Amino acid sequence: MIQENELYRKVADACRWETADAFRLQSRIHRLRWFGRSDIWVKRDDELSFGVSGTKLRKHASIIPSLKQQGIEEVVVIGGANSNNVLSAAQTLTENNIKITPFLLGPPSQKLGNSKLFSLFVDDSEIHWISRAQWADCEDLVNKYVEKRKAQGIKIFVLPEGAHHPLALPGSLSILVDILRNERESGVCFDHVFIDAGTGMVAQSLLAGAAALERKTVFHVVVLAGSFEEFKSGLSRVIQYAEAFLGVSFRSLPDYHMYYPATARSFGSTNNSIFKEIKRIAREDGILTDPVYSAKLFLTARQRISEQRLEGNILLIHSGGGLALSGFMDCSMFSV
Ligand SMILES: *Cc1c(COP(=O)(O)O)cnc(C)c1O
């Protein structure tokens, strides 16, 4: 077991919190008024940045200082054309004068939302498009490119899909550090935490951090991409990263449950129920959510809290991603 202040110090060091240009990773919490209750709260990671989704800002917060320290000049970023991680990396890398070389699944038939915004940052001619048929060979294609650049003397790094990488661990753990701060400031101790998972990096880090502190919280993970099995294998990898980073071995994991989204199960898919939920959240809670991540988290959490009659203090993490909504402005579902 480690102490909270030890966790804080390690995360603060890796994210260089003492420097003026460090990413700010503190977000507030406030109550939702669901079911007439006053013990359901939301953590506003969506407020961490306008352009970079909250979870991505956390991951990049420890990746970027390490890349700078290593003198990395170019980063290959792998992902979908509409990936939040790709759009976020275009911002955090460019800001830090590191060249982004995207290897993207596509091209899409029409650029909307994130992929359109991405073209503000990177010229189309710089994108390496990989068709779906070639996607399985993406790693080989990237390796070939990386070897070529290394031979030219360029210091290059490869950021995997969704930034699921050991360098993202300290930044991902910052979410637990910040929840502890929220608890101290509000005097509320959370019994249940709901979080969404894409690659699972942030949710897995939260579980690993809770294991390190031996916290008794129950975690509810909404698995939005991939399967429960894939989440669990990612979790074992992140536990290894965390044990190495924190210098302890964990006795046991906290209690956690996994759910597939209550509707529109496949990653990136949406339907009328999702857009109805987006409108409900906007009207009743006053919060913008996106159809890929946060609306599915809210919808699934509402259902689980009511069906399982969950008691105690509950925290939902709103991970951000609102810019993705811009891709749906002219979509007929938008106004259901
Ligand atoms: C990427 C992303 C997630 C998922 O993060 P992972 O660490 O890949 O699980 C959740 N919400 C938003 C808004 C994201 O952009």
Image: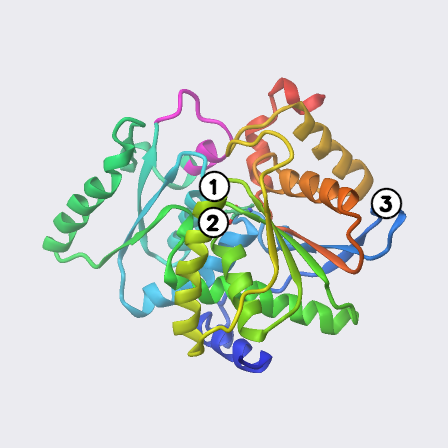
Measuring from the top left, give residue 164's x and y in whole percent: 40, 53
Query: Which amino acid lies under the numbered mark 2 shown in the image of this protein?
Result: Phe
Query: Which amino acid lies under the numbered mark 3 shown in the image of this protein?
Result: Phe
Label 3, label 2: how far apart the Cα atoms are: 30 Å
Answer with the quarter of the image where residue 240 lies.
bottom left
Q: Is residue 169 visible?
A: yes
Q: Secondary structure at mark 2?
A: helix
Measuring from the top left, give residue 264's x and y in whole percent: 59, 29
Is 269 situated above or below 18? above
Q: Which residues are magenta?
A: 107-118
Residue at horizontal 53 percent and vertical 53 percent from the top: 55
Q: Secondary structure at mark 1?
A: loop
**Callout 3 touching callout 2 (CB < 8 Å):** no
**Residue farthest to the right, as pictured:** 36
Q: Secondary structure at mark 3?
A: helix
Q: Is residue 25 visible?
A: no
Q: Which residue is mark 1?
A: 227
**Residue farthest to the top, as pictured:** 332
Q: Which residue is mark 3?
A: 35
Label 1, label 2: how far apart the Cα atoms are: 6 Å
**Callout 1 touching callout 2 (CB < 8 Å):** yes
The reply to whether the residue tagged 1 has its Cβ within 8 angstroms of ligand 1 is no
Measuring from the top left, give residue 37's x and y in whole percent: 87, 51
Residue 157 left/right relative to 90: left
Question: Is the C terminus in the top left, top right, bottom left or bottom right quadrant?
Answer: top right
The reply to whether the residue tagged 2 has its Cβ within 8 angstroms of ligand 1 is no
- Of labels 3 and 1, the one closer to you: 1
Q: Which residue is mark 2?
A: 231
